[in-house]
Image (cartoon, rainbow, N blue to C red):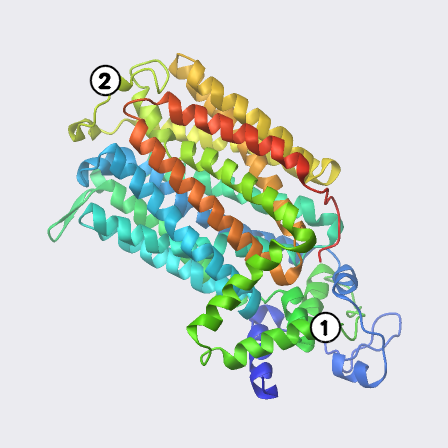
């Protein structure tokens, strides 16, 4: 790659308002008398260069990380809203779109199919072109096509638009955790990633609250040309707002990951990110960032440079090989065993969580006559006329189940850096398996809601622990690709779970529910094969 092309790439990464510096590093002196200079000046004067971990520790921990948590958390919440909104609109949208239970299974599966397609592709791009750029584009795709789905006049058009929206979600979900983790000092990383994961709960509660507020409100109905714009369509539009606002925030104010910049040879740009982190974390102090130069990874820089130079001219086969290469790396050498275990865990938890969670509102509706969701299947044939009037209790119960995430999130934040992700994942998967089994066993609606809340509160611990482990088990140049691959595995599991529920929920509801319990138990036992990663340095 030419020096000009490499310079433009690095300049793009640093061309963010958040990186504007209020400290003149060429002339300003710290309060203890040491001169604060630019990285280039220091290099000529022979100052020692620092590693990524050393620079991260010097940047400190404080306001910057709080602002970063809010921005990344909102992005994570927007993904939750866009995915989980499907479960809340199905009980009423099935009438207007004339859906059978099988159609509803296909519709929820389409989002995960899009996420599977987008997950690995966006992950590879994030490892080569940068986390921040990928996040902006993927969240914009998610929001735009999510909103357009509200105008779909038929089932197949709605399915297509939700599939494209899912491609966007597939990019932002894995990349946001890679991006966020690369700003965290290792002693704080577990708790901070757990805190980031709690925003999924916020998105879940937001989606449930909007559904409870909007969908039963038939006064929002109006005619848009030949389209009968029901309240659930307005709900779909509102659910796209978080993704669009997140894309705007990342485009305007968020910097590129300093770890990625160092791995791609953009030393000066990475140094400016660290300087801004230092300034925000030490507001009111006259000191400047003491690090004058950074150690970059030359081999990764050459690989990245070659990718940029040949990008458009590479034959399709070469591009395919570039895409497959990270998979081969994560399944070879010392990473192979942990990758095999992580594949099983991601499949098991995704089949269980998404297979069951996406059907909770529909199952709650089927339990309205009393008994468990599976006890009254014989009387719940698919008759579209039963959608109206909308039963508010269904959305209230969905809101309560979403809010039950809170205790699990609090426990995760308090225990992650003490117990470690491996132990938390093992225990939470076992308890989740037991709670799902009792959803099938109980015979009253109240008990069904209680066990659903237990499952909700414990399963969120599973996901939080898995998010932490996923970022700690892989080195920087493979982290987003690995998360993208596992996200693809998770989507296959989610698709399978939703299709199975759609096919069997009207005939033999016990089979998919017990399958969920069995998969969660399997995932918990396999977790014991993972290495412990508590408070380790990122590779």
> Which residue in the protein does label 1 denote?
296
Q: Which mark is residue 379?
A: 2
Image location of residue 443, percent across then percent down: 40, 12
Residue at horizontal 58 percent and vertical 67 percent from the top: 255
Identify which residue, 478 or 458, lies in the foreground.
Answer: 478
Identify the residue shown where x is 52% and y is 59%.
Answer: 123
Q: Establish if 165 lies above or below 251.
A: above
Q: In this view, does 201 lie above or below 184?
A: above
Residue sitting nearer the eye, 110 or 176: 110
Quadrant location of the C terminus in the rendered image: bottom right
On screen, residue 493 above or below 433: below
Residue 56 as seen in the image, left or right of residue 411: right
The residue tagged with tag 2: helix, strand or loop? helix
The residue shown at (67%, 75%) is 265
Mark 1 nearby-residue class (10 Å; few <14, some 14–19, many ≥20):
many
Residue at the limit of the structure toward the left, as seen here: 226
Is residue 275 visible in the rendered image? The answer is yes
* Residue 362 place in picture, x, y as percent: 32, 29
In the image shown, does 3 or 510 lie closer to the viewer?
A: 510
Residue located at (47% from left, 55% from top): 119
Q: Are marks 2 and 1 in contact (CB under 8 Å)?
A: no
**Left or right: 267 in relation to 375:** right
User: Which is more N-terminal, label 1 or label 2?
Assistant: 1
Residue 139 is situated, as x and y percent measured from the top left of the image, at 43, 58
Question: On screen, 431 above or below 156?
Answer: above
Image-based side of 500 in relation to 94, left or right: right
């Amino acid at each position: 790659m030419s020096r000009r092309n490499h310079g433009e790439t690095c300049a793009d990464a640093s061309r963010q308002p958040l990186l504007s510096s209020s400290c003149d590093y060429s002339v300003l002196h710290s309060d203890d008398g040491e001169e604060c200079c630019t990285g280039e000046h220091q290099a000529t004067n022979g100052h020692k260069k620092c590693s990524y971990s050393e620079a991260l520790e010097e940047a400190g921990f404080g306001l910057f990380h709080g602002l970063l948590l809010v921005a990344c958390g909102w992005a994570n919440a927007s993904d939750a809203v866009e995915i989980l909104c499907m479960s809340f609109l199905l009980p009423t949208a099935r009438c207007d779109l004339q859906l059978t239970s099988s159609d509803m299974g296909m519709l929820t599966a389409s989002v995960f199919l899009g996420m599977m397609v987008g997950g690995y592709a966006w992950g590879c791009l994030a490892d080569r072109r940068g986390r921040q750029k990928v996040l902006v584009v993927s969240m914009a795709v998610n929001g735009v096509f999510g909103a357009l789905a509200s105008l779909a006049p038929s089932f197949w058009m709605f399915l297509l638009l939700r599939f494209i929206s899912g491609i966007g979600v597939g990019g932002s979900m894995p990349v946001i955790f890679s991006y966020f983790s690369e700003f965290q000092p290792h002693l704080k990383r577990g708790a901070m990633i757990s805190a980031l994961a709690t925003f999924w709960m916020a998105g879940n509660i937001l989606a449930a609250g909007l559904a409870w507020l909007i969908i039963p409100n038939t006064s929002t109905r109006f005619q848009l040309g030949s389209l009968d714009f029901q309240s659930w369509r307005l709900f779909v539009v509102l659910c796209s707002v978080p993704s669009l606002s997140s894309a705007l925030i990342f485009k305007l104010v968020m910097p590129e990951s300093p770890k990625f910049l160092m791995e791609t040879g953009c030393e000066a740009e990475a140094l400016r990110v660290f300087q801004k982190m230092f300034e925000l974390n030490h507001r009111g102090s006259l000191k400047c960032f003491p690090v004058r130069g950074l150690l970059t990874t030359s081999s990764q820089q050459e690989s990245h440079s070659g990718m940029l130079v040949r990008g458009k001219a590479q034959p399709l086969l070469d591009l395919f090989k570039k895409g497959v290469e990270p998979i081969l790396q994560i399944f070879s050498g010392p990473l192979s065993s942990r990758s095999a275990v992580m594949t099983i865990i991601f499949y098991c938890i995704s089949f269980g969580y998404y297979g069951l969670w996406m059907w909770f509102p529909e199952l709650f509706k089927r339990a309205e006559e009393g008994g468990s969701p599976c006890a009254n299947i014989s009387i719940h044939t698919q008759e579209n006329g039963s959608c109206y009037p909308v039963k508010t209790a269904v959305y209230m119960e969905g809101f309560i189940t979403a809010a039950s995430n809170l205790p699990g999130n609090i426990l995760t934040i308090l225990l992650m850096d003490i117990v470690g992700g491996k132990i938390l994942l093992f225990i939470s998967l076992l308890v989740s398996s037991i709670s799902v089994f009792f959803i099938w066993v109980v015979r009253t609606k109240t008990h069904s809601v209680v066990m659903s809340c237990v499952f909700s509160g414990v399963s969120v611990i599973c996901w939080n622990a898995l998010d932490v482990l996923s970022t700690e088990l892989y080195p920087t140049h493979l982290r987003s690709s690995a998360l993208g691959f596992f996200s693809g595995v998770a989507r296959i599991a989610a698709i399978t779970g939703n299709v199975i529920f759609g096919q069997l929920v009207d005939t033999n509801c016990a089979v998919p529910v017990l399958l969920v319990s069995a998969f969660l138990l399997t995932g918990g036992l396999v977790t014991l094969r993972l290495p412990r990663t508590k408070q380790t340095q990122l590779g």
